[in-house]
Image: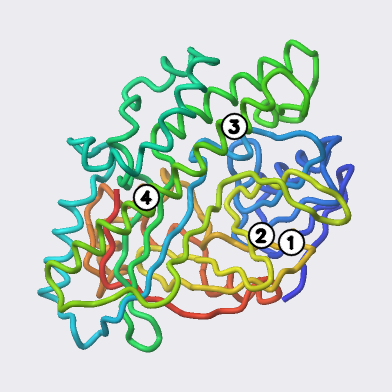
Amino acid sequence: MPIHQVITEGEKPVKVWTDELDPRSREQLVNLSRLPFIHHHVAAMPDVHAGIGATIGSVIATHQAIIPAAVGVDIGCGMAAARTSLTAEQIDERTLKKIFDQISRDVPVGRDQHRDERALSEAAAPFAAPLAAMTDKHPQLLKAFGRFSNWVNQMGTLGGGNHFIEVCLDEAGQVWVMLHSGSRGIGNAIGNYFIELARRDMERWFIQVPDRDLAYFPEGSEHFDDYVTAVSWAQSYARENRDQMMTLVLAALARHLPPFTVTGEVVNCHHNYVEREHHFRADVWVTRKGAIRAREGDLGIIPGSMGARSYIVRGRGNPESFCSCAHGAGRRMSRTAAEKRFTPADLAVQTEGVICRKDKGVLDEIPGAYKDIDQVMANQSDLVEVVHTLKQVVCVKG
C-alpha cells in the first residue's frame, strides 16, 4: 500500500505508512520535522511507535548533522538469518528441546558473557586499536564502559530485552536460524556518552530543540567526527557479534542433528544505525531508528514476536521511504503495561507450539504486546516483497 497519511505541522512533511499512530508518536515525528537540518521529509514506517526523542520505526535524513539519541544506545542492533539444508522431517520436539538447552548453554544471554576471551580473540582483534584510539581521545569513555570494559567477552552474546535466537521453518519446511542483537553493553556506553555530549553542546551554544533527546552534532563541530568514528565502530562490532553468535548457534544444531550446510546467503542487517547516503539529489546522513535499508534487491529480515511469523524480504527501492522498510512488528504497549495485563497462562497460549520460556520473566515480550506483523507487512507492500515466511519452533530470549 502507498503512504497512509502526510503530517504537515512542521517545517518538513512526515510521510507515514500506517493509520495506527498514537499521539505521543505523532508528537515525536512532528518534533523531528521541525529541526532545521531535516532533508526533504521524515518517513515513518508501519511499525512506528514512541521512543526516546525520536520514534522507533522512523527514517531521518539530515543535512550536515546527526542526532545521537535518534541512532540510540543499541547501536547497530539488527538481525541475522541463515537457511540450512535441514528440513522439518529431520527434527522432532525432543530434539528441539535439546537444541534449546544447547543454545542456552553456548550463547550467553542477558548480562552474561563468555568467560574465556581467547576463544574470540581473532574476531575481536581488528576492533582493539580503533577502540584504544577512541579512549585515548575520550578517556571518560573508560569510566562509561564500567563493567562492559571486557568487550571481547561480550562478542558473541545475546543480551536481554527483545533480543532473541530462533530456529524457524519456512513455507517449504526448510530449517532456518534467525537472531536479533546489537553492540551489547559497550555500544550502549558509547551511545549514552555521546548523547550526553550533544546535550551539553546544545546548552553551551544556547540552541533550543523541541526535545532534549533531539540534541545534535553539526558537521565541523568539536565532537562530530569522533561520534561518526565511534558509531561506525559500534555498528561493525554489532555485525561481528551477530556473525559470532550465528557460528555458535549453527554449532549447537550440529551437535543434535544430521550433517547439514548453510544454503544461500546469510542475511545480516542493521536496524538502528546511521550512514551516509544519496537521496533526493543530495548526500545526507540517514538515521534508521528501528528500520532497515530496502534498496532494490536488498535482502532484509522483519521479525514478528515470540509467537508470530517473520519474513525474509527483498527491497523495492522506494525513494519515498529513503529506500527503507519496517524492522519488525513494533510494540503496541509498553513493557510495564504488558506485565500488568498478561499472565504466564496467556503467554503459554500465545506461544503454543514454540519451545521457549513461558514464565513471568518474559511477559513483557508476549506476542499480545506487539502489533499485528501481517498488517505491518500489508502496509509496506510498496517497500518490500516477501521472499520467505518463517515460523519459529524454538525461541531463546535474554
Question: Residue 312 appears at what percent x and percent y?
Answer: 49, 73
**Which of 307/230 is in front?**
230
Look at label 3 and name its amino acid.
Thr
Name the N-terminal-most of marks 2 and 4: 2
Question: Residue 211 appears at what percent x and percent y?
Answer: 70, 29
Q: How far apart are marks 3 and 2 (CA)?
A: 28 Å
State yes or no: discs 2 and 1 in contact (Cβ < 8 Å).
Answer: yes
Quadrant housing the N terminus: bottom right
Q: How far apart are marks 2 and 1 (CA)?
A: 8 Å
Identify the mark at residue 321; answer none if there is no mark: 1
Identify the mark at residue 45; answer none if there is no mark: 2
Name the N-terminal-most of marks 3 and 1: 3
Mark 4 or mark 3, whichever is nearer to me:
3
Mark 2 or mark 1, whichever is nearer to me:
1
Residue shown at 37% from the left, 89% from the top: 172
Q: What element carries label 1?
A: helix
Residue shown at 79% from the left, 58% from the top: 15
Identify the mark at residue 229; answer none if there is no mark: 3
